[in-house]
Amino acid sequence: MRIYLILLILSFGSLNSIAQQTENRFLPVQLYQFSEFYSLINPARSSENFKFDINVGHRGSAAEGITNHINYFNGQVKFYQKYDRFHKVGLSFTGLAEGQYFKKNQVMVSYAWKMPVGKKNYLSVGLSLGAFNYSIGATQLTAGANSMTSTGNAGVLFYNDHFFCGVSVNQLNNGRVVPYTEVTRLARHYNVICGRIFHLNQHISLKSALLIRYVNNPKFDSEKPFPQIYFGTILGGLFSAGAVYQYRNGMALTAGLEGIYLNDNKLNFFFSYQVYSSRTRLNLRSYEIGIGFYIKEKRSPVKLEDDDSE
């Protein structure tokens, strides 16, 4: 369903502006606020009509002297129930490297359950749990060190063909890592995302969405609840383009291909780039590339008839 593209593209922006700030140089508050794959933030999210979801991506910076980069993977598999309900189980990995020595890695398993609410609406709830590790490589003068803590996310998503609204709590246990003497916290925070899609005709659709993030007891300016606003369009059901604006963090432009079908399976591709302006706090020139592959389940006609009869 195309409403999910709004959810996914909307999530761009926070990491671009936070990752290399002086006060947060070791750990962004929102570690995985990615452009396209909203399920990394809210475990309640999943694709509507596919058995398997596979998402991979890379984020980097074109600014001279900044060597930070992020790689991520997210996979989910669906298990059907009666009455248009299903379970979804997933595994995700996030790796953040800052230069040669500082590395953060996170592994999480997720579970989501979806049920219909009325004739056209759906409700999904999800939970993800895992571990976060912060390691510092050894040098000629110092020994290496690492610190690990548990982490988790929980979320709820309400949606239909034209509207959605999701709420998630991230980094549930408000953990901290201490590889040396400096304490780095994984601040608990909340994301609220709502939006709507407008189908002008069979060839053009318009999208809009709003994201607000709130951090408990914010210590830095970057942790304050600045909103993000997204506007975009889909042309011919294939080409997508849009822009995300975040207060004081500038604008990110997005473009991509969606709905590339290969024997009923679907492939999405996107690229995004942060635009610098005189009011932007940092000129990171961050970019991101991602691919989503969605595999259709091969369900027999007999099984489909049995499901309908139930």
Image: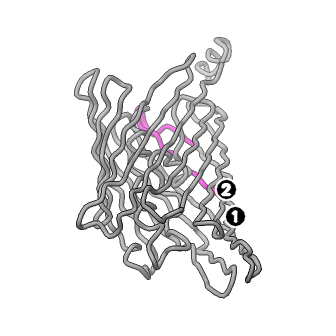
Give the residue displayed 46% in from the left and 79% down from the top. Answer: 23
Q: Is residue 5 above or below residue 192?
A: above
Quadrant of residue 83 in the image? top right
Q: Disc 2 designates what residue?
A: 108
- The answer to whether residue 33 is magenta is no
Label 1 amino acid? Ala
Label 2 amino acid? Met
Residue 168, percent across and down? Answer: 49, 59
Left or right: 66 as drawn, with respect to 51: left
Give the residue displayed 66% in from the left and 70% down from the top. Answer: 101
Outermost residue, bottom side: 181
Give the residue displayed 43% in from the left and 79% down from the top. Answer: 218
Left or right: 7 as drawn, with respect to 200: right
Q: How is the image coloured?
A: one colour
Q: Disc 1 designates what residue?
A: 131
Image quarter in which the N terminus is found: top left
Residue 78, percent across and down? Answer: 64, 35
Q: Are marks 2 and 1 in contact (CB under 8 Å)?
A: yes
Q: Which residues are magenta?
A: 114-128
